[in-house]
Amino acid sequence: MKRAFAILAAVTVPLALGPLVAAPAGAAQPRIYHTISSTLGSATIDVTQGCERSEVFVSSSTAMYAAQPGPVGKQGLTGVFVRVTDVCEESPALAVTAAAGGGGTVLFEADAQNRAPLVVDPRLTRASVTTDLPGTDGNGDPVTVHLVATWTGTGPLEHTTESTHTRFDDGNVNATDNNLRRVATAAVSVRVEGRSIAGEDTEAVLEQTKSRCIEVPRPGVEEFYPCFGFPG
């Protein structure tokens, strides 16, 4: 079930990081990317009533990015995935889909996303997001998911740092990360297509990253993007 978080979190990569840093004449031009701050809240709720199991996967983020020099870009992103299954009935025709949710016939699915930012304090003690997200159901029809989610930090604030310098045949890359993480309790409520689902996740997470990544391609090299895997 946590697999859904990776899908939602992946879309928090900056859409554009602005101009590049000038380099001395004759030298390869470095590309410098700054994540001034990127904070993510994630949670999963799993509620079963009778034969009906409801799962909700939530990911919400807020971030500021910049090149050096260059303007600061701000970006919010929130995503929700909802799945409702009948755990008392197994459908061979839906075996692949049902396996992803732990078995049972899928009664309803919805996937929604918008640019709503996570509201969070710098120490990751609390966070929230309330928004209406446009999306589609399992048949591809449009739906709107109303989301209310709050996070309350419960665990200690974990702080880690990392610095790497890697040499490639096509150039070099230098990267630094300054990370904060706190386990939290998340209260999540969604409404979609006449369904209301609410619950708590006591193992939710709030994470913050501040980082810098510098790409230095060798002269003549054009396709060298180790920071994100594509041009910033």
Image (cartoon, rainbow, N blue to C red):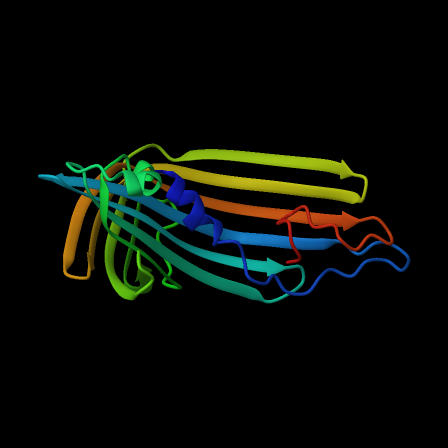
Q: Nearer the viewer, residue 16 or 162?
A: 16
Image position, residue 63 (x, y; %): 47, 56
x and y percentages locating residue 84 in the rendered image: 21, 47
Report the number of discs.
0
Asked whether 25 or 47 is in front, the reply is: 47
The answer to whether residue 119 is visible is: no
Residue located at (64% from left, 47% from top): 227
Tell me where residue 196 sits by quadrant.
bottom left
Q: Position of residue 176 (x, y in %)?
A: 61, 41
Decide: is 144 above or below 219.
Answer: below
Task: Determine whether 102 is above or below 71 in the image.
Answer: above
| Vertical position of residue 89 compared to residue 227: above or below | above
Q: Quadrant of the N terminus?
A: top left
Residue positioned most to the left: 50
Q: Can you name the residue that lies furthest to the front here?
A: 93
The answer to whether one can see residue 9 in this image is: yes
Residue 153, percent from left and from top? 29, 40
Which residue sits at x=48%, y=54%? Answer: 12
* Left or right of 216 on screen, residue 137: left
- 73, 102: nearer the viewer: 102
What residue occupies the far right of the structure in this picture? 26
Residue at the spot 12% in from the left edge and 39% down from the top edge: 51
Image quadrant where one finds the C terminus = bottom right
